[in-house]
Amino acid sequence: MSQKEIIYLSFGSFSNHISTHFWNQQQSYFTYDQSDLASGSTSRDTPHDANDDDEPLIDHDVSFQAGQTLSGQDTYSPRAVLFETQHEFGALSRLSALYDSFGAHENVALDSLQSWGAEAQVIAAERTRTSVYQHRLELEDQGVDPGSSDDDDVDPIDGSTVLAPGVPRQRKTKRPHRFWSDYARTPFHAKSLVSVGGELMAPMPGSYNAAASPADADGRTRFETFSQGSRHFTELEAQHEVLDTNIRWFAEDADQLQGLQYTLNTSDAFGGLGTTYLKHLLDEYPKLAHFVFAAAWGSTVSTPDDDAEHAAWANRLARLRRMNELQALVACMEAGTLVVPLSVPRWDGAQVGSDWRRGIGRVDLGDMHHAAALVSAHLETATLGTRLKARSETLGSLAARLNWRRDTKLVHLGGVLPLAYPSSSASAIDPVDALLQSYGYGDARTRNARGAPVESASELAKRGSEAVRASWLDLSLPSTGAKATQLQRTLTHPYAHTAVLRNTHLDSARLGLGMLDALLTHSPAPFAHGVYVPLSYNLPSSFPNLFSALDGSYASVRRPETVPVVSSLMTTPSSVLRFKQARETVREALHGHLPLQAYGLDAEDARDALKETRELVEGWIDAYSVDNGGGDASGDDEAMGTDEEYEVDQKDDQDGLDWDL
């Protein structure tokens, strides 16, 4: 029996935003009739042009499991476990009414008090209101057209402010979605939702819904450091036994697991919590693939001291994020089968493709709803091969190909959304037709084009692949420190490359396959693998309209129903930039003038642990510093040898100062 099911684990707000878009996309693949709707699904999930006679391309059993609600109703729910602070669930408790055994009109607490026969004071937190989008979905369920909201959340473009010639400033949305549950279209099983810390736990300061300044603190414990998350694992298991009650419950329902796919925040305490679960699940399921998407959110750049109070607050958060991301990276590299770091690109930052903003000119990269949509589209597309009915790919085979050297666990996620196909000024024609046209035969349009060069299919595909490279967005590059010249090696010198191109229009299949082959030209055989899927990326109403005209004008366009996408996973020498950033964080903590507690390190052996981390990071830098030809791909002249490191450590220990006090 071939491997099939995947269990999805998500830790933290940004990861859950990514997962929400992922599950909304999975829900959009269902093509059932109105008369045969699965429980928890509605007519809004059925594409209007769905052909029920066609064999579905997606194997829904990979990501969904059949079951029953508490009232005995059949349902189909995601094989997912989402970890979140209580506040960040928003109104999800009311949205997931499938597994609520009590009616909406019943109040269990008040009913139980009636039997007591005495006065009681009920103290309850204010309930989160259902979002405007969920009200829109309710109207859709009732058959009412709520109208388009494409332009409701985007400020008008200001063409007077530009970053570069032809590139306007980044647009800002009104951010109508505070929580990821505000636009969730997929109902989750009760065992899929795990509250971390209860009402007394709050997100890390500076996060999406957390306090923006110390003055806004409300007395709740902030879930902000890696070590805090690691310690909370013990408390969570003691209270709820999540490993046995939730995760193992999904595993036992599966026939033949492919593996586990993790999406976890690395900038806050969820990095510590998620990697601790990763280590325990690796011990529990050592033969399965553990595929980790490590998502960072928030600035890690220190700010000038112009505003002393604001700068101290912002720099503290940036310092904690840098250390959290370092510790999460090391933990993921030690336990994960493959690790894909995810960073939201800066609008004014360097990228692999200089034209990467083309087509997504309305995106607000500071809004989790927008940024997660962009990340999730590429994540979902790049892993699509593991969920196809006619799949030849599993998480295990994907990991074996990408990490064939056994020392390149770190993988880059990237691609182009939307994918623009090149148009030929002179289409390739049959040689006999070309001969007849040279003598004046054929239609007038063809005769007028006589003498124009005929572009072959391979030339057109090559030109299309060059346009893809020019628009390539790498979501795994560090948010700072990357130079344009260093990024060219991402696509031209990969160790291994797996790409997925998806487009429903079969008349473009030949050109798409040619573009895919040309894109993989630089990858060494047999570690280049391309998949063409005749299924475009669906854009449900929950997906933000971040699209703009493809002509470079950044003009607004109406949101299409589907878009072609190309996404890929690759191991590349560019990963050395990520490890150099990690090395700089270690160097800053060990040789700076701040105590290690300022970085969230409160263990007695924190300094020794950092020195061990430095050795691991240097080893990874060495592994990614050799290109396919055996040469040095890093251009790194700053690495220290073992003797130099020993001398520096001795100087630190003998300077007469104890910075850990």
Image (cartoon, rainbow, N blue to C red):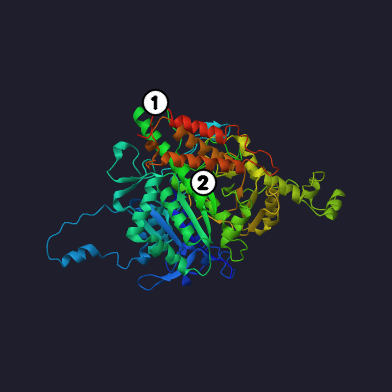
Residue projecting furthest to the bottom: 72
Position of residue 92 relative to residue 478, above or below, is below
Q: Residue at x 37, y 66 (%)?
A: 98
Q: Position of residue 26 (x, y in %)?
A: 50, 60
| Three-letter amino acid code of the residue under disc 2 | Leu
Residue 290 seen in the figure:
yes
Which quadrant of the rendered structure holds the C terminus?
A: top left
| Three-letter amino acid code of the residue under disc 1 | Asp
To which residue does mark 1 refer? 306
Mark 2 lies on a secondary structure that is: strand
Between residues 102 and 504, which one lies in front from this camera angle? 102
Between residues 200 and 370, which one lies in front from this camera angle? 200
Residue projecting furthest to the top: 306
Q: Position of residue 258 (x, y in %)?
A: 54, 63
Cα distance, mark 1 to mark 2? 31 Å
Q: Are marks 1 and 2 in contact (CB under 8 Å)?
A: no
Which quadrant of the rendered structure holds the N terminus?
A: bottom right
Q: Which mark is residue 342?
A: 2
Residue projecting furthest to the left: 118
